[in-house]
């Protein structure tokens, strides 16, 4: 199947599956305090650090998943790779939900949670490459940025849903019940909707391309000529990932560092999801019309100026208005600038290696920087006692990303005049 052939139901199938998979993965971050209490003894601060370290363990296997499942997307097709990753995620999320606590089975509990968390990471590492390749190969050339932005919006929509579920659970259940077993409800909700994702993905067409006249698949191009591009994309993804996961940390930050109520803290997650979905789609549209580079550079330049005042405002006011307003601003800037880097990479590499390259580069960046961000921020806050530590961490990441954005080549057809299908 070539470009211009995707139907709305095909897009909906990819988006729905992508959203469900990211919901399962990100829910852990929102219940880090409660999960730490269930599986990691040693006091509130140590259990939270162990819990966040386990959250990070899910990132260690993402490059492996990107390499294996992303490459499968180039060898056997986008659809089979997406089906495999989604099935593995279903097993992992159910495993986390049903693992007994440390008080019940002892050290086996954290061992099992770490295993299932690593399985989640492997599955999610193989998700981004095939889904991005599928959408960009079926998109009209002048709307590629928007189509890729749909996947980012689906991921952030999952944040919105996870935040809503967490807020409801935290509002309905007393704190002791939320900590003992209530957090498991959010994971079970994710596990229950996995079969829906499998059903909708079975109907997808294939975008990888047909064999040549001899029946053989075309040879796979070498990756080495794209080394410079990959380095720049890694720098941009490092920036986006650190900013994204620091903003996602707002729930834990508000609860553990600022000592705000749990239902108010979970409300910040809902705010992140709401503003991020809109920012993703606007970013895709802007990148198609004005170019990928300018769409990244302007929001991140504003982020560099805004992040320290935002965290100062939150930490000194410690009110609902301060938390939600600053979170909304940072989430919007992050999503406006963060999306086009994946589009640039997808447009720049050939079809026969696109799924594997996108999956591996994206997963490596997420593993190296996303998995460590929340742990590092928590550790720095504990070490220094400075509630502004997240802002300093983000500012360093943004400065790095802006350098790469200034050096990368423009790929938007509206700016380059190259409009053929990929």
Image: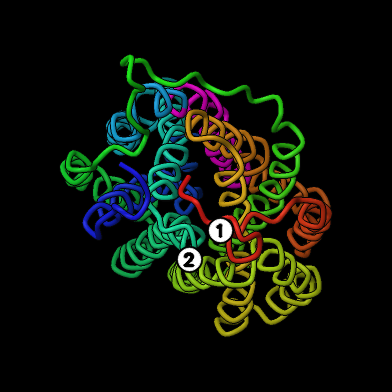
* 106 left or right of 393 in image: left
* 308 left or right of 270 in image: right
Membership of 67 in magenta stretch: yes
Position of the N terminus by quadrant? top left
Q: Is residue 191 above or below residue 402?
A: above
Residue 188 seen from this side: yes
Membership of 193 in magenta stretch: no
Q: Is residue 223 above or below residue 86?
A: above
Q: Quadrant of residue 368?
A: top right
Give percent across and percent down for residue 313: 72, 79
* Numbered badge on residue 327: none
Q: Residue at x 73, y 45 (%)?
A: 379
Q: Kindly give the residue lying farthest to the front in the view shown.
A: 213
Give percent across and percent down for residue 201: 23, 42
| Residue on which the image places disc 2 | 269
Badge 2 crowding class, 10 Å Cα cut-off, few under 14, some 14 to 19, many 20 or more, is: many
Residues tagged 1 and 2 counted as in contact (Cβ below 8 A)? yes
Residue 264 seen from this side: no
Label 1 – label 2 distance at C-alpha: 7 Å
Nearer to the camera, 67 or 106: 67
Numbered range of the magenta stretch: 43-70
């Amino acid at each position: 199947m070539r470009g211009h052939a995707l139907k709305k139901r095909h897009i909906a199938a990819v988006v729905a599956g992508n959203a469900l998979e990211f919901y399962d993965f990100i829910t852990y971050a929102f219940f880090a305090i409660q999960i730490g209490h269930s599986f990691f003894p040693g006091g509130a601060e140590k259990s939270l650090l162990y819990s966040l370290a386990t959250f990070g363990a899910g990132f260690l296997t993402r490059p492996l998943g990107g390499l294996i499942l992303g490459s499968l997307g180039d060898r056997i097709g986008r659809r089979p790779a997406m089906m495999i990753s989604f099935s593995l995620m279903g097993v992992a999320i159910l495993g986390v939900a049903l693992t007994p606590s440390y008080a019940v089975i002892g050290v086996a509990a954290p061992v099992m949670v770490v295993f299932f968390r690593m399985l989640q990471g492997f599955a999610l590492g193989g998700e981004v490459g095939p889904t991005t390749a599928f959408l960009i190969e079926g998109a009209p050339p002048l709307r590629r940025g928007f189509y890729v932005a749909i996947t980012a919006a689906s991921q952030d929509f999952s944040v919105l849903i996870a935040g809503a579920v967490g807020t409801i659970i935290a509002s309905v259940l007393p704190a002791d019940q939320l900590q003992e077993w209530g957090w498991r409800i959010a994971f079970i909700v994710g596990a229950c909707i996995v079969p829906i994702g499998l059903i909708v993905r079975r109907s997808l067409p294939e975008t990888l391309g047909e064999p040549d006249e001899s029946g053989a698949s075309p040879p796979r191009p070498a990756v080495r000529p794209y080394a410079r591009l990959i380095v720049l994309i890694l720098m941009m993804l490092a920036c986006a990932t650190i900013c994204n996961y620091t903003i996602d940390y707002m729930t834990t930050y508000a609860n553990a560092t600022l000592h705000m109520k749990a239902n108010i803290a979970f409300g910040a997650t809902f705010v992140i999801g709401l503003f991020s979905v809109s920012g993703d789609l606007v970013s895709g549209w802007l990148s198609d019309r004005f170019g990928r580079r300018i769409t990244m550079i302007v929001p991140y330049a504003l982020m560099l100026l805004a992040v320290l005042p935002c965290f100062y405002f939150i930490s000194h006011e410690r009110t609902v208005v301060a938390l939600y307003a600053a979170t909304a601003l940072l989430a919007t800037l992050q999503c406006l600038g963060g999306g086009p880097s994946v589009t640039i990479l997808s447009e720049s590499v050939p079809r026969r290696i696109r799924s594997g390259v996108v999956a591996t580069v994206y997963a490596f960046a997420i593993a190296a920087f996303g998995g460590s961000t929340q742990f590092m921020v928590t550790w720095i806050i504990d070490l220094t006692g400075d509630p502004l530590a997240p802002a300093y961490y983000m500012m360093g990441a943004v400065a790095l990303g802006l350098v790469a954005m200034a050096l990368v080549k423009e790929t938007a057809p509206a700016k380059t005049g190259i409009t053929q299908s990929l």
